[in-house]
Image (tube, rainbow, N blue to C red):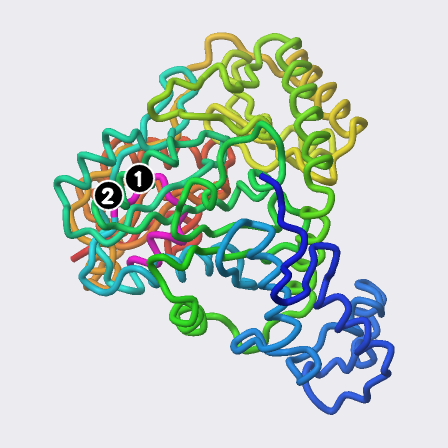
Amino acid sequence: MTVETVDPKCGLSQDMAPLHDALARYRANRIVPFDVPGHKQGRGTPELTEFLGRQCLSVDVNSMKPLDNLGHPTSVIRDAETLAAMAFGADAAFLMIGGTTSAVQAMIMSFCRAGDSIIIPRNVHKSAINALILSGIKPVYVDPGVHPGLGISLGMAPEDVESAIRANPDAKAVFVNNPTYYGVCSALKRIVELAHSAGMSALVDEAHGTHFYFGEGLPQSAMSAGADMAAISMHKTGGSLTQSSLLVMKKDRADPGYVRTIINLTQTTSASYLLMSSIDMARKALATGGRETFRKVVDLAEYARSEVNAIGGYYAFSREIVNGRDIADFDVTKLSVNTLKIGLAGVEAYDILRDDYGIQIEFGDMGNLLAIISVGDTHYNIERLVSSLSEIKRLHRREGLDLMDHEYIPPVVRLLPREAFYAPRRSVPLAESVGEISSEFVMCYPPGIPILAPGELVTREALDYILYAMDRGSLVMGPQDMTLSNINVVK
């Protein structure tokens, strides 16, 4: 898309960074602080200041008149949000400093209330299901496809969404993951059209799709597809600090003032200016130079993919898996690599890369690993990754290992998430839980997609997957019992 660089109504342009400029003025004015935070521009915490730097601590400040207030922005934060809306082709944007978790939850709760239904893929991030627990919204799950060779969950097929809409005409919204962690994209524009034709809103978890707005030849962005709202992780592929995100929206079906009210239900009143300014500065960089930046990112990712595939055994997949149904497009910046043919689970390769080669990739699951290629990567780092994978194959390859080759377990839903979460519960040994109804989450993190969610039956298949993931070294989390010996189930 072409980024609008100047708004004639307010005189703002994309080469501006209002929050950066306001913080620079604050620092230059040598303000004497008798407010929070208590470290007083780093003077009270010398060890922390030495570690993070005085420049950083000097602008870790509280809301004040020259710096605006995130809960009710009227000056520099308002301008930063206006510029973000312009850059992302939205009518309004909100700086989110609770990560995309907070953006997803605000998005759902802006369009649905207690007792309403939402059509949603089951392979959503836990933040979406948490929103259902908090608000009492009823999920209508659409099972994603599962790739038979790769074992990864896919997007929602339009015909499945259409069937869910016909069966649930009172649903308020359709929720879409786009892209998935692995880079799989749904037929977003068609799904948006289906939702709107039924009088429903279209909401998009676009956590991994910041670059769709600024690159060339990449999958369609949520706003250009006509979605009503999208949650965007600026920190994942946009270059801002961890935990900083955006919520962007069109005004056709929701009022921005009401959306801010929903956001303020859970968002902190002590917003981090480090996080907010990082969003503002990353937006400026993307809007003014993102096209060239992501051209380089795509080139790096394609080079990495070809080199990994040349090793043999590994399969770094790309657009050749597009099938026009539940894989409508593929994000080529994702270096998703299937490891099954070298006899290693993805999580095993993940551990070896980190422990033996000093390389930290995003995650490994039962059959795949994912390396995020983005704005800060270099050709040298790609070469290190490729050579390390080649050596891992040489040193660790196994033949005939029976690997569990799928990461999506179709759920058996017995109760609504909210009902199960708040129901009386009892603790049972995990190994003896088959046939019980879970009252809590169990998931590998990352990616944070629940294997079990509250209200779902513990099946043999789900338990086997959990035990296999634990045995292979995955970080399995969610249960109250952090040893994972026991799980809470509905009485």
Q: Are the residues flagged by discs 2 and 1 in contact, CB closer than 8 Å? A: yes
- Estimate the spatial distance between the alpha carbons at disc 2 and disc 1, rounded to whole Å: 6 Å
Q: Nearer the viewer, residue 28 or 287?
A: 287
Amino acid type assigned to the residue bearing label 2 in the image: Ser
**Is-magenta flag for residue 129?**
yes
In the picture, the quarter occupied by the C terminus is bottom left
How many tags in the picture?
2
Residue at (32%, 37%) from the top-left corner? 191
How packed mark 2 is, by other alpha carbons closer than 10 Å (few <14, some 14-19, many 20 or more), is few
**Spot occupied by residue 375 in the image (x, y as percentages of width and height):** 71, 39
**Is-magenta flag for residue 487?**
no
Q: Which residue is mark 1?
A: 193
Disc 2 secondary structure class? helix
Q: Determine which of the numbered discs, if any, sits on residue 197 in the image.
A: 2
Residue 96 sits above or below residue 34 on the image? above
Q: Which residues are magenta?
A: 119-132
Amino acid type assigned to the residue bearing label 1 in the image: Glu
Residue at (67%, 59%) from the top-left corner? 280
**Spot occupied by residue 321 in the image (x, y as percentages of width and height):** 45, 17
